[in-house]
Amino acid sequence: MSFVSVEQLQKTYSGTPVFSDINFTISKGEFVTLLGPSGCGKSTLLRCIAGLTPVDQGKILLDGQDIVPLNPQKRGIGMVFQSYALFPNMTVEQNVAFGLRMQKVKADDSHKRVAEVLQLVELNDFAKRYPHQLSGGQCQRVALARSLVTRPRLLLLDEPLSALDARIRKHLREQIRQIQRELGLTTIFVTHDQEEALTMSDRIFLMNKGRIVQSGNAENLYASPVDVFAAGFIGNYNLLDAETASRLLQRPVTSRIAIRPETLGLSLQGEPDTLIHNHSLLGNVIRYRVEVRGVELVVDVLNRSPADLYPDGQRVALSIDTSTLCEVA
Amino acid sequence: MSRAEAGTASVYHRSVVYLLFIILLLPLLGTFVYSIASSWSATVLPSGFTFKWYLQLWSDPRFLTAFGHSLLICVGALVLSVVLILPLLFVVHYHFPKLDALMNILILLPFAVPPVVSSVGLLQLYGSGPMAMVGTPWILIGCYFTVALPFMYRAITNNLQAINLHDLMDAAQLLGASTWQAAFLVVLPNLRKGLLVALLLSFSFLFGEFVFANILVGTRYETLQVFLNNMRNSSGHFTSALVISYFLFVLVLTWVATFLNKDKSQ
């Protein structure tokens, strides 16, 4: 039994469709990510679910109830924004308590719940501070606490990590996931960052031009992209058309092929038909740009020791693991 | 930068600031000294000091009435502008952001048309007919509203753009606040600073307004500046006392308002 179910959802904005024919279901406690490039409609879809943007057609069922006719106040949905959207005139405590104040929760009860949720995001020492006295990461944790305190049925996260620097982002992403698991909270997360999507989600909906292109868990999405867009958006696939692929594999190929750079191997044994153009060090991985039989490829090799590095201009042998080749539409 | 250089720079910076202060304060200081001088005509220094001009001024019923009139008209115009402009700004920025461009042109009009010109037009329009308001304080309140509009609109717009209006409204609504609650509890408190700046600026400007007051209403509802103008032939000491009183009033008002508005969080 699905907890959230979106059926035939459609939205046009002054004549141009933002998204159409959106269908998906989410089970209770699931962490789902809408992943896609900017302008693909993912944020609008999230705002439609929140009720901040009206939809043209379709149903959004939350716990069996169609919430499309309800205004955002009545939906029981919490949301965290990229810009934090904290109220600058209120302290952390007052910000978090705002939702309870609107629900007319009694003061001592509200006080207890605010303290609990601030504990959860590890900000109880900052209760009396104002938002402008906090760092970006702390602000976003306050925003998270504020949306959790009303015990929403569904939590929406609209690129909450995009405004933060890399270290904080990694830490906060683990913290969000941990809290979400602890509370068993059904969550929809929007991002354009494939790494965030792959590391955090139970399931990913990959969106492009207002459609869900592919859905599945991280492994599935990463290992078998359904089309050129999916292969181009996730990972660093080498995308080859049929003709180039035939030349590379030296056998007739009829469709486009996507090859993950880490499934290719370079070695000094075998026929040295591959020329190393250049390389870049990504840390744990060395990314080579090579050419073989007139085909340019990207090859990722684990960076074991500097001694194994192939200098630019060297000729080496390329091994292709044909079982990981992926035909894409 | 070495210490010596820092020293010279600091001397330079200081002297510029002090020079500016002197230029601004010297006329006021002169007026003040004149207002407490018993007589000061053929000598370098006043022949004696007295507060009699102030006593005379503050016991003059005509002055007190004019002061009250000015206060009433300014407050009236400002209340009108707050009541009208705040919702207007909110609607423009929340629902029709495109109208902002139009508003920016509209608010230039009070500056583009000189008061002498527009008051002639206003005299024609409101001198007779169904809306004969010339000579009553109402026309001044309405007229001052248009004068205050640019100050109010600009200051509050800057303030609105500094806060993320849409996200704040969205967040408040998702937390269960109605549009009204969100506007009053979340947006309005964050506009306090801009609003206060706008009010102070408009108030001190309107309190000293002369052209509209003199042409549209004149002595029929005498305001402070019109009174000052009518007193120009009386003792210079007396009018100096008036100017200083007027200046101190605006100063104290500004100071109190700034004090009350001091942010607890900073």
Image: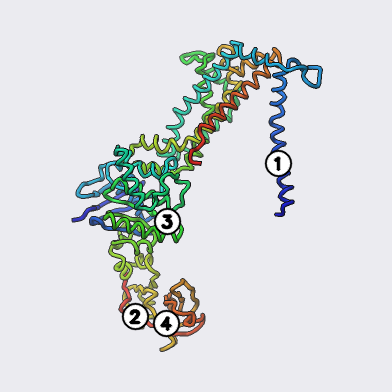
Q: Quadrant of the N terminus of chain B?
A: bottom right
Q: Chain of mark 4?
A: A
Q: CA distance from mark 4 to mark 3?
A: 36 Å
Res. A321 mark = 2
Mark earlier in primary sequence (4, 3): 3
- The residue beneath circle 4 is A266
Given the image, on which type of amino acid does mark 3 rest? Ser
Quick check: A180 above or below A251? above
Query: Element type at marker 3?
Result: loop
Relative image position of residue A181 (x, y in whole percent): 29, 58
Query: Element type at marker 1?
Result: helix
Q: Chain of mark 2?
A: A
- The residue beneath circle 1 is B14
Instruction: State whether discs 2 and 4 lie on one chain.
Output: yes
- The residue beneath circle 3 is A162
Q: Nearer the viewer, residue B47 or B136?
A: B47
Q: CA distance from mark 2 to mark 4?
A: 12 Å
Q: Residues within 10 Å of mark 4 (few under 14, many from 20)?
A: many
Relative image position of residue A117 (x, y in whole percent): 33, 49
Count of marks, rendered view: 4
Relative image position of residue A268 (x, y in whole percent): 44, 87
Quick check: A298 above or below B27? below
Q: Is residue B244 left or right of residue A168?
A: right
Which residue is painted at 38% across and 68% down in the image? A235
Query: Element type at marker 4?
Result: strand
Query: Element type at marker 2?
Result: loop
Which residue is painted at 44% across and 77% down in the image? A303
Mark earlier in primary sequence (2, 4): 4
The reply to whether dot 2 and dot 3 touch (C-beta < 8 Å) is no
Instruction: State whether discs 3 and 1 lie on one chain.
Output: no
Given the image, on which type of amino acid does mark 1 rest? Arg
Q: Nearer the viewer, mark 2 or mark 1?
A: 1
